[in-house]
Amino acid sequence: MLPFLFAAALLHGAGPGQPLTPESAAGEWRPLLTALATKGAVQGSFTERRYFPFRHDPTILTGTLRISPERGLSLQYVQPEASTLIADASGILLRDAAGHDSPMPADSHQAGAIASLLPIMRFDLAALFPRFDIMAQRSGPDWRFEFTSKDPQAASALGVITVVGTGEDVRHLEFKRSEHQRIEIEVEGPRSGLTFTEPELRRFFR
């Protein structure tokens, strides 16, 4: 539980931190950013909570998160309905339980959030710096990054994207458009440096 308590403290702590610049990314932040960017394939369980202004309680979804540096991001939802959301260089698609693929509309809020999450989860700074203003905060092994799109229209659609972690592990993700409209994802038991099998790649990626 301790990593989650530290992550919560950073997530809700005072102030967004300091601006992350190409200079600071190449200096004091370089060891952490290099470790995050080179950790290889990742897999972990997640709980996603979607908050809406018109609902008192959040919609809760659970499943498995997978990241392949070569193939992209995969969110395998188990509850309340089985499906897999895949984000890669070709776009975003939703794969149903029977294995049928449907492209997600590029202008949907969820598609924009997931598309932004792909370079963020890879910590691909070459892709991130031109698109986002980034704030960074750190306390011992615990860290937090806030990403705000430099494009006003995208910033209004996506809100602030926050990533919180401990060591080399991402523990919490948040897409916040307002206090009453946001998506929170808690990642549990992340494992890195994995090698996905060919059947796993075919099932959870494209």
Image (tube, rainbow, N blue to C red):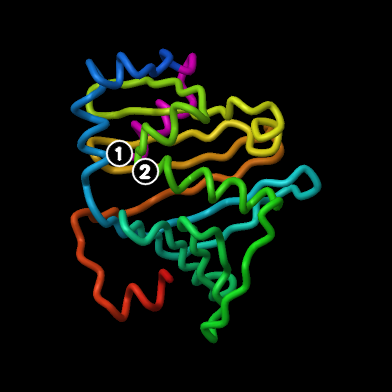
Q: Is residue 196 above or below residue 46?
A: below
Identified at 56% across, 27% down, the residue is: 148
Image quadrant in which the C terminus is located: bottom left
SS assignment for the magenta stretch, majority = helix
Amino acid carrying label 2: it is Arg
Q: Is residue 112 above or below residue 75?
A: above
Identified at 36% across, 43% down, the residue is: 171
Residue 2 lies in the magenta-colored region: yes
Residue occupying the far bottom of the picture: 98
Q: Answer with mark 2 or mark 1, whichever residue precedes in sequence.
A: 1
Front residue of this view, candidates 137 and 114:
114
Residue 158 lies in the magenta-colored region: no
Residue occupying the far right of the picture: 54
Q: Quadrant of residue 71?
A: bottom left
The residue tagged 1 is 3
Q: Is residue 90 above or below residue 4?
A: below
Image: magenta residue range = 1-16
Tag of residue 171 = 2
Identified at 64% across, 56% down, the residue is: 59
Q: Position of residue 3 (x, y in %)?
A: 30, 38
* Residue 32 relative to residue 16: left or right: left
Q: Position of residue 161 (x, y in %)?
A: 53, 35
Tag 2: Cα neighbours inside 10 Å, few (<14), some, or many (≥20)? many
Secondary structure of residue under mark 1: helix
Secondary structure of residue under mark 2: strand
Could you tell me if the residues under marks 2 and 1 are in contact, i.e. CB atoms within 8 Å?
A: yes
Q: Is residue 70 above or below residue 19?
A: below
Tag 1: Cα neighbours inside 10 Å, few (<14), some, or many (≥20)? some
Front residue of this view, candidates 108 and 15:
108
Identified at 52% across, 43% down, the residue is: 116
Amino acid carrying label 1: it is Pro
